[in-house]
């Protein structure tokens, strides 16, 4: 059994069912203080690039100024809870309809974030 199936819960249900939005994973929210900095990640040129979230890099646009968000997978990693968010880009119409992330992308994420417990997929 692979890492994606055995060590994680993959959640692609809508907000109405999970009460979890994209902003609930790896974002500084009111009332939540993180011990470790959250990580902003993006798939760039076939590699997962990461930047610690801080005042200089609060969003993907600041962290990766040349990122084409129409075709690039992005998300955040929250090391305190080992939660990972994956945003399927607008240009990936089939994956967005199915709420599926290609196995090649998941392999790269596994390598970059080996301690992940829950993966939240957003469209």
Image (cartoon, grey):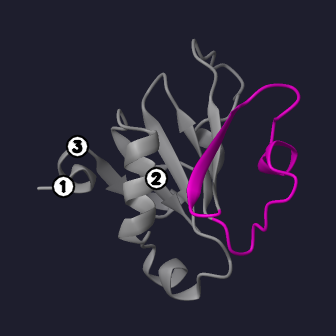
Q: Disc 3 and disc 1: Cα gap in Å?
A: 8 Å
Mark 3 element type = loop
Q: Quadrant of residue 17?
A: bottom left
Residue drawn where x is 53% and y is 49% of the image: 85
Residue tagged 1 = 2
Which of the pair 50/86 is nearer the observer?
50
Which of the pair 15/51 is nearer the observer?
51
Mark 2 element type = strand
Label 1 packing within 10 angstroms: few (<14), some (14-19), many (20+): few
Q: Quadrant of residue 102?
A: bottom left
Residue tagged 2 = 120
Magenta stretch: includes residue 55: yes
Is 106 rendered above or below residue 55? Answer: below
Residue drawn where x is 67% and y is 82% of the image: 91
Residue drawn where x is 68% and y is 77% of the image: 90
Residue tagged 3 = 7
Return the disc, 2 or 3, that comes first in the chain's sequence.
Answer: 3
Give the residues in magenta: 45-72
């Amino acid at each position: 059994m692979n890492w994606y199936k055995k060590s994680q819960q993959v959640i692609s249900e809508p907000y109405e069912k999970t009460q979890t939005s994209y902003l609930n994973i790896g974002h500084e929210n009111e009332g939540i203080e993180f011990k470790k900095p959250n990580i902003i990640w993006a798939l760039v040129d076939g590699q997962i690039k990461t930047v610690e979230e801080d005042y200089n890099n609060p969003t993907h646009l600041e962290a990766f100024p040349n990122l084409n968000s129409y075709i690039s997978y992005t998300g955040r990693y929250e090391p305190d809870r080992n939660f990972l968010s994956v945003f399927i880009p607008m240009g990936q119409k089939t994956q967005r309809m199915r709420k599926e992330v290609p196995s090649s992308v998941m392999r790269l994420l596994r390598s970059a974030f080996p301690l992940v417990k829950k993966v939240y997929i957003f469209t």
